[in-house]
Image (cartoon, helix red, strand yellow):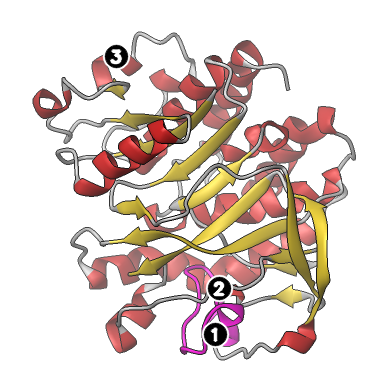
Amino acid sequence: MKFTVITTIQSPTFAVLEMTRVGLEQGQVTVAVGDRKTPGEVWTKVPNFLPLEVQGGLGYLLGTLLPENHYSRKNIGYLWAMSRGAILIFDTDDDNAPLAGWGPRTLATSARTCLQLGWVNIYRYFTDAYIWPRGLPLQHAHQSASGSELGGALEVMAPIQQGLADGSPDVDAVWRLLMDQDIRFRAGDSVHLREGAWCPFNSQSTWWFPEAYPLMYLPSFVSFRMTDIWRSFVAQRCLWALGYGMVFHGPEMFQDRNPHNLLRDFEQEIPGYLSNDRIRKVLEGLSLVSGAEAVGNNCRSCYEALVGAGLIPAEEMALLDAWLSDLKRVVAV
């Protein structure tokens, strides 16, 4: 089966209902993970809603450790989908609706390889607007792009694939405070980032295949605005040990963004502004083990290194170990 996983603290939105409807047409089952703030009574008629009281009865070690009122409770939805034989998981949010043409991706996909190494502003391959993805170090935000930086289209294997979102795409608070505007990305060729090329990816329009399931873990003891971004850095580093890169597709979702306090977002993003480049250097310096059987241990090695560098609190490791233990019980990895 194929699953879509969201987390929510509000009533079912148009985006959720549309994602559920379109997903069913495409053979994709939607599961919504609730939290303490979620008005559960309005979700009772929505299939596959997991309120807190249900999450506690699923038997996951991680469920007893995850904080309430935190985005990382989405981890429960990932485990729930995996336990039901998920062969593909689409990771998105309750303010993202599918565009026409949205549909499940395949592990093998056509993409043009980016010849640039280091930090890559992936948005510049899909728009001429001055914009950059949340998590890209600000000193690289002005980066330009041209077709000459891309190789020819080839079929690549990509266990993690990020689609872009039109409307209110995923950007940081600096861009939104200074230049906020409606964005429409070009469809264009997909772009493949090979080993040595880095770009943050989010949890709003991302396809995960079983080879990468251990890397879906969202950390709890980091800033809310960095939990999926720092996960993406760990995931990219571990993909290299598997012999894979990251693929970005043109727009496949439309984000009608939930209300945000932008100054609070900015405050939550400060750890990223100050540390993302250092995280990259720590992860690049690791020697990981190749092969699919090593993915979970490689993921742990990455977090262990970030803890050792003082970038993530040591308390994170107990939750990560619970995740890896739960993962072994629900799916063969």
Give coordinates of residue 268: x percent, y percent.
36, 63
Secondary-structure class at tag 2: loop
Residue 193 drawn above or below residue 179: above
Q: Which residue is mark 3?
A: 54
Magenta stretch prevailing secondary structure:
loop
Up the image or down, 263 lies above or below 90; here it is below
Evaluate if marks 1 and 2 touch, with contact meaning CB atoms under 8 Å apart. Answer: yes
- Relative side of 158 to 321, left or right: right
Q: In this image, 29 relative to 316: left or right?
A: left
- The residues tagged by marks 1 and 2 sit, at their Cα atoms, a distance apart of 7 Å
Q: What x and y, as percent, mark residue 332?
A: 71, 17
Numbered label attached to residue 141: 1
Q: Residue at x 18, y 61 (%)?
A: 259
Where is mark 2, residue-wise?
A: 136
Residue closer to the observer: 63 or 186: 186
Residue 142 lies left or right of residue 76; in this view the side is right
* Label 3 crowd (10 A; few <14 / some 14-19 / many >=20): few
Q: Residue at x 61, y 45 (%)?
A: 105
Q: Is residue 199 above or below residue 13?
A: below
Q: CA distance from mark 2 to mark 3?
A: 37 Å
- Which quadrant holds residue 38? top left
Label number found at residue 207: none
Quarter of the image containing the C terminus? top right
What range is drawn magenta here? 123-140
- Label 1: few (<14), some (14–19) or many (≥20) C-alpha neighbours in 10 Å: some
Q: Element type at marker 3?
A: helix
Is 156 or 101 nearer to us in this picture? 101
**Residue 133 within the segment the image draws in magenta:** yes
- Residue 183, magenta (yes or no): no
Picture coordinates of residue 255, whole percent (x, y):
32, 61
